[in-house]
Image (cartoon, helix red, strand yellow):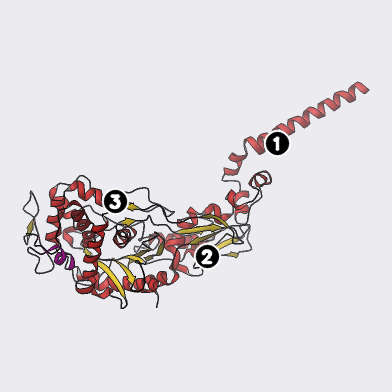
Amino acid sequence: MTRYIRYAAAFCALLLAALLVNAARVQVVQARSYDDNPANRRPAIARYQQPRGDILVGGEPVTGSRDSGEQLRYERAYPYGPLYAPVTGFASQRYGTTLLEHAEDAVLSGTDPMLSPLPLWNDVTRARNPGGDVVTTLNRDAQEAAYEGLGARKGAVAAIEPATGRILALVSTPSYDPGELSGNGEAVASAWDRLNADPEKPMLNRAVRQTYPPGSTFKVVTAAAALDAGVVRDLDAPTLSPDPYTLPGTRTRLTNESDGCRDASVRMAFEWSCNTVFAKLGVATGAGNMLSTAQAFGFNDRRLRIPFSVAPSTFDSGADRAQLALSSIGQYNTRATPLQMAMVAAAVAGGGQLRPPYLVERTTRGGGETVAAYGPRPPRQVMRPSTAVRMRQLMTDVVREGTGRNAAIPGATVGGKTGTAQHGIGNSGVPYAWFVSWAQADDDLEPKVAVAVVVEDASADRGDISGGGDAAPIAKAVMEAVLGP
């Protein structure tokens, strides 16, 4: 009998060992495949079992969480609706995450190991930390001024602090309420279909994901390249520019919207945005110098993240001389995001140095303790300091007595450049109105803000004055919000 008991005990021990081996195989070796299996709802249930961390602007949350009482318990809430959508993106139980909600998902959802003082213990217990918070660089007043300024018009605004690269405003209109996509019911699916079918594309982030021909605002880049290359030495000397200007190697004649551009000085041509002068200037500066300056400003950079990705702005590296002439006035294949053009203005305001833009100041635990801090990244020299001084003179002249007078602010020095980018077959489309600018209060030691505004449905006439009429007042409101009373 004893022998049979031993056999039974050995067999039971063998079965127990087999169970342990199988459990280890399932829980350790195959754990990831089970976790990733679409049929496994446990990760989703765990993810939404606790409130998500918040995105903060000016120390106050612009996101929240609401208890749905369902199995996927907490849904994302956006109390400010469309105002911050181009920054936050959405966090949907059905369609995933975008923008900051995606780039900082590990912190917001509580899965970032940095949120736990004992990350190894969390790995063993599979415990989930409370969601952390993301503190942005945004200026609440500037964001609201940009959003209200655009109103019902289609367009975008980007504002940067030149000395640091902190993004102060990022607005795109028309916008949408990300809260409509938070849950997973039929209402969410209906909202998704409606938003994606909308011809106005409210979910398109025009500030960082849409590129436009920058038109005459690109003349800031052309002027800087010409000054750095020594092609221009005296801003007030005649440029010997014909009007109209025949593009090199073609019979195509380029004209101006303004009068008095024949042989105009660079200062006068910049104030009144003479296409002929700057097209000829770009050709004289040369493709190599134009390309290197454009790239120093950030064009053709596919690596820029703020922390979510930014569509690359482009300057064609293979253009012939006629195409170079058009590229030098912001046409042909030259395209830019509003954020890129804010970077152009920031480089001028920053004395020729450009700090890469960033949107997240720091991430914190729920109690406020800092997990990771971010700050200004090393600057790059875009142009010579002496060139930056002269570019600031040119831009202040535009606001003081040129096409940008609508951006003037009492008690502050403001520099700007208007632009109208034509598009469509035969330039038949309604032009895009641009304005790029920077501002420095009289009692400040350095410029505090650089802004770029684009309005797609500008209703003014086709001259560069439309940038001053449609976009400049919006830029002025944003700059005033940053400078304060």
Residue tagged 2: 63
Q: Report the quarter where the C terminus lies.
A: bottom left
- Part of the protein shown in magenta: 253-271
Q: Earlier in the sequence, mark 3 or mark 2?
A: 2
Disc 3 from disc 2: Cα separation: 36 Å
Q: Earlier in the sequence, mark 1 or mark 2?
A: 1
- Image check: 39 left or right of 352? right
Amino acid type of disc 1?
Ala
Q: Which residue is outermost to the right?
A: 1
**Residue 378, x across and y down, in percent:** 39, 52
Which class describes the residues within 10 Å of circle 3: few (<14), some (14-19), or many (20+)?
many
Q: Report the quarter where the N terminus lies.
A: top right
Q: Earlier in the sequence, mark 1 or mark 3?
A: 1
The image quadrant of residue 375 is bottom left
Residue tagged 3: 296
Q: Is residue 256 magenta?
A: yes
Which class describes the residues within 10 Å of circle 1: few (<14), some (14-19), or many (20+)?
few
